[in-house]
């Protein structure tokens, strides 16, 4: 008989074959046979393709307890990505008292006038798991605000102001910490970079050195950070050890957090990608940036993270420099660091003369647009294959798109497969104001053209689900109304706010707008904008945007982080209204998490599943948690439409063999057949024990009560041999 195997990492495809069960020998090695499925006596191997699982943060609960008013405390927490579709419920404790059990959603309003502490425990298969760390009730009101906020203390450096905030788990405790630049009031001073824990413990400061004194936003110095649209640093766990690194574009004279100074005196314009220890700021490794355009000066641009192999995160740096006072050269590079040396994966060059053919914007997005499980790089008007740096398409070629300030890519239309994009235009010679397109192919689906002169720089544009009466998302910029995905106007009235930043805040799945400290919601019935809240006593660090916004705490909705007006703290505002919507933390959605790794002109966060009115339940994200042990490597793979799975003759399996049943799983029970006695334990992918038992010289049915999800099965024989299997229950 022919045995088919597949490597999860290589996306190989299985062949089809039918086998009568009496053809399978009773004792056979794993190289010949690991798995047979039996119900009617026929084994069916079907043709499938599997994708690797990307390593993402092993997050904690992120629990917050906010004093909502004198009588109520609002508590919310994370549903983790791999437990979302696994039937996990939640118990909530006030002190040691259970106050709510088997909750399906991740928020609860506790009616109580006194303050206490709260903990959350997941309930898996009826078994209560370990409690989360305790959190105290937050009662802080900053200034004249009326909403409570979490205050993260930071050092107040005289003559300096913090700017955009990046986040990652620096200390490995499952919660997100903060890294940001401090910009000097005195133009002769250098730029600083500081790191803090989630609780405000100062970790380190780096000085970007004399080459950060030039802060001209179009052509800044070789180590300048966070000026204009050039961010040039990010935060992420690159080697998947559970602790995030800080990645910075550096040059001669940068002083790291441990006090050492980087020296390359031969040329102050030479630049390097540096990996810093997130806890100490010490340099761990660095790589020289390609010098193809060095004669035109240092490069400035946008940094982000992409999973270009579908498994491990890589650093993307899209950078430009100017030829005289004309057009810009563009260089896009991809780097990987897994704990040793930094590898340059590929370089994509676009000389200034090609800028119209390959239009760019003022930020990048990294997202898998073609569905192969590997992220691509989107500089705005063209798409780069993340695997090898080749161009997938240019929107200039497919639809006459030129440079524009902002764009969004996500699932805007639940009736179409894949993702869509929306961009606005600056001085398009055809008069195009915006276009809506297929993100996989670049095909223009809808656009608005206003040919009358003068040409317009539209500056802002926003996509979101603002009108629940129309299928899919809507978008608007400074034209004549709000449009839907069909290209039809849903309203001729315009919101009073700029189309600035879409945010999920109030608890429904529609989008709100955040602009200039004002949180508002579109009233689709009355065609006007309702003000939800106006934030006060903060410092605007950008163009009417906060230092950070995103789902960094609590349930799936998004937090807003402002710099306090006294510069002594970061103010974290979190939603305090109940929601009946159950969603996993958006940090475990691949596209969404990568949105938080880049800035440029700050643009809206996006998901790679449809999040809006009429949405279906999102699938479990195809991820594994970093720094957690799960079966990896080459798996024997088979799929069946039957309902019973048998694992036969376990004692004959080779020591390195593992098995996965995918994508057509069992809908009933799994049957384990082992000669001799054995013990088994089943874990969910969050590491929780959901079932355990034993058997002896017989076929044992397991997993009948499991909810649909992916599980890890450990079987140990009487001679101490242990095997791991990956099972899917539908």
Image (spheres, helix red, strand yellow):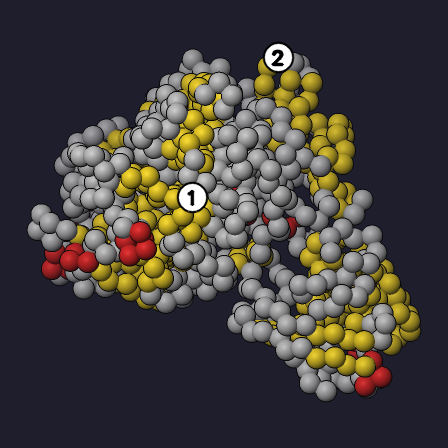
Residue 390, numbered circle: none
The answer to whether any part of residue 550 appears in the image is no
Above or below residue 701? Residue 233 is above
Residue 292 image point, x, y percent: 18, 64
Figure check: 136 above or below 217: above
The residue positioned 82% from the left and 58% from the top of the image is: 668
Instruction: Point out the residue furthest to the right here.
Output: 697
Q: Is residue 103 left or right of residue 55?
A: right
Per the image, the residue denoted by label 1 is 596
Seen in the picture, residue 669 relative to 223 is either above or below; the reply is below
- Work out whether mark 2 precedes mark 1 in sequence or the reverse, and give the earlier one: 2
Mark on residue 70? 2
Q: Is residue 328 visible?
A: yes
Residue 534 placement: quadrant: top left
Residue at 56% across, 74% down? 12
Q: Helix, strand, or loop for circle 2?
A: loop
State which quadrant residue 8 falls in.
bottom right
| Count of numbered circles in the view | 2
Q: Quadrant of the N terminus?
A: bottom right
Report x, y in % for residue 525. Answer: 51, 21
Identify the secondary structure beneath mark 1.
loop
Crowd tier of the residue under label 1, counting other residues whose Cα lies within 10 Å: few below 14, some 14–19, many 20 or above:
many
Write the residue at 38% across / 54% down. 442
């Amino acid at each position: 008989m022919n045995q088919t195997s597949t490597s999860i990492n290589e996306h190989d495809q299985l062949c089809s074959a039918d086998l009568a069960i009496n053809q399978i020998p009773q004792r056979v090695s794993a190289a010949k046979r690991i798995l047979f499925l039996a119900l009617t006596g026929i084994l069916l191997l079907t043709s499938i393709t599997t994708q690797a699982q990307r390593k993402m943060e092993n997050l904690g609960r992120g629990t917050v307890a906010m004093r909502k008013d004198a009588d109520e405390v609002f508590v919310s927490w994370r549903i983790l990505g791999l437990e979302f579709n696994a039937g996990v419920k939640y118990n909530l404790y006030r002190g040691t008292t259970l106050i709510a059990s088997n909750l399906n959603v991740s928020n609860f309003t506790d009616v109580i006038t006194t303050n206490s502490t709260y903990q959350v425990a997941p309930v898996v298969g009826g078994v209560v798991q370990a409690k989360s760390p305790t959190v105290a009730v937050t009662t802080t009101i900053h200034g004249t605000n009326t909403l409570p906020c979490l205050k993260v203390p930071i050092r107040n450096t005289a003559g300096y102001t913090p700017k955009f905030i990046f986040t990652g788990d620096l200390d490995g405790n499952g919660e997100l910490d903060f890294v940001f630049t401090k910009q000097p009031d005195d133009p002769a001073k250098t730029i600083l970079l500081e790191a803090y824990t989630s609780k405000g413990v100062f970790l380190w400061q780096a000085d970007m050195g004399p080459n950060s004194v030039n802060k001209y936003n179009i052509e800044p110095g070789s180590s300048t950070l966070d000026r204009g649209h050039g961010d040039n640093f990010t935060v992420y766990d690159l080697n998947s050890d559970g602790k995030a690194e800080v990645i910075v574009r550096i040059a001669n004279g940068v002083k790291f957090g441990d006090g050492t100074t980087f020296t390359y005196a031969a040329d102050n314009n030479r630049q390097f990608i540096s990996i810093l220890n997130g806890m100490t700021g010490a340099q761990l490794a660095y790589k020289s940036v390609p010098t193809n355009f060095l004669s035109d000066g240092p490069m400035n641009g946008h940094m982000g993270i992409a999973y270009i192999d579908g498994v491990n995160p890589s650093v993307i740096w899209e950078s430009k420099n100017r030829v005289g006072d004309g057009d810009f050269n563009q260089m896009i590079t991809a780097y990987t660091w897994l704990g040793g040396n930094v590898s340059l994966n590929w370089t994509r060059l676009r000389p200034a003369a090609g800028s119209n053919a390959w239009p760019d914007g003022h930020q990048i997005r990294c997202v898998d647009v073609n569905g192969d499980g590997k992220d691509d790089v989107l500089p705005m008007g063209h798409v780069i294959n993340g695997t090898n740096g080749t161009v997938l398409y240019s929107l200039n070629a497919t639809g006459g798109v030129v440079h524009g300030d902002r764009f969004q890519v996500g699932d805007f239309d639940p009736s179409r497969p894949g993702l869509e994009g929306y961009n606005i235009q600056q001085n398009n010679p055809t008069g195009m104001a915006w276009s809506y397109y297929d993100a996989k192919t670049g095909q223009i689906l809808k656009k608005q053209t206003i040919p009358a002169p003068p040409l317009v720089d539209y500056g802002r544009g926003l996509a979101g689900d603002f009108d629940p009466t129309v299928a899919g998302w809507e978008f608007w910029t400074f034209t004549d109304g709000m449009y839907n995905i069909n290209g039809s106007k849903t309203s001729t009235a315009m919101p009073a706010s700029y189309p600035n930043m879409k945010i999920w805040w109030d608890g429904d799945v529609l989008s709100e707008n955040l602009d200039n400290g004002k949180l508002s919601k579109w009233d689709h019935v009355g065609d006007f904008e309702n003000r939800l809240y106006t934030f006060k006593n903060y410092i605007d660090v950008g163009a009417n945007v906060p230092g950070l916004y995103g789902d960094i705490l609590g349930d799936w909705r998004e937090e807003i982080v402002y710099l306090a007006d006294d510069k002594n703290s970061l103010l974290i505002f979190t939603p305090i209204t109940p929601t009946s919507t159950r969603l996993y933390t958006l940090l475990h959605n691949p596209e969404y998490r990568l949105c938080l790794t880049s800035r440029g002109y700050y643009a809206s966060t996006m998901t790679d599943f449809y999040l809006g009115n009429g949405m279906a339940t999102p699938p479990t994200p195809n991820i594994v948690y970093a720094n957690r042990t799960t079966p990896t490597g080459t798996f024997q793979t088979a799929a069946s439409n039957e309902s019973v799975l048998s694992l036969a003759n376990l004692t004959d399996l080779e020591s390195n063999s593992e098995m996965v049943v995918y994508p057509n799983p069992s809908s009933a029970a799994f049957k384990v057949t082992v000669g001799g006695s054995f013990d088994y334990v089943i874990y969910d992918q969050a590491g929780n024990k959901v079932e355990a038992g034993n058997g002896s010289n017989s076929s044992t049915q397991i997993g009948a009560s499991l909810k649909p999800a992916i599980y890890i099965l450990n079987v140990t024989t009487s001679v101490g041999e242990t095997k791991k299997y990956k099972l899917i229950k539908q």
